[in-house]
Image: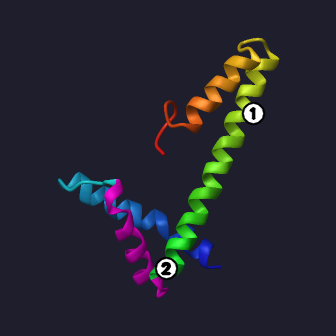
Amino acid sequence: MKESAVADALPALRDEARSDEEAGGTLDRKDRPDVAASLAEALGLDEPTVQTALDDLRTERQEERSAALQERLDAAVADGSLTQEQAAGAAKAVELGILGGHR
């Protein structure tokens, strides 16, 4: 329940942060602790509980992204676009944060 409540509340908090950013503020990873505090206050939960839920959500989403990437790489190997070695290298580069987004 708490994880879904946090997940449901995140979009509103992100929208608020984007509005602040558009008004000249910044949206930065260093502000992540503030996210847990803001959500805890909005949801009436303690901050450690919210932080645990955020960590769980982040892990779940990373696992989903990894599985989707592996499916795309497997398809590329199957259709001959990549060799197995190239696919493994691409997966490792993403895992290390060299390619494909933020860690």
For residue 48, the mark is 2
For the residues labelled 2 and 1, the Cα–Cα distance comes to 35 Å
Q: Where 21 sits versus 74, above or below?
A: below
**Circle 2 or circle 1, nearest the eye:** 2
Q: Where 86 sits versus 101, above or below?
A: above
Q: Position of residue 6 (x, y in %)?
A: 54, 72
Region of the chain picked out in magenta, as a range: 29-46
Which badge, 2 or 1, is on the more N-terminal residue?
Answer: 2
Dominant secondary-structure state across the stretch colored magenta = helix
Q: Position of residue 88 (x, y in %)?
A: 69, 26
Q: Residue at x 60, y 79 (%)?
A: 2
Dot 2: few (<14), some (14–19), or many (≥20) neighbours within 10 Å?
few
Q: Position of residue 75 (x, y in %)?
A: 77, 24
For residue 71, the mark is 1
Whether the magenta-drawn stretch holds residue 40 is answered as: yes
Work out which residue is located at the far right of the displayed protein and give it.
78
Image quadrant in which the N terminus is located: bottom right
Q: Residue at x 47, y 63 (%)?
A: 11
Looking at the rendered structure, the secondary structure element under dot 2 is: helix
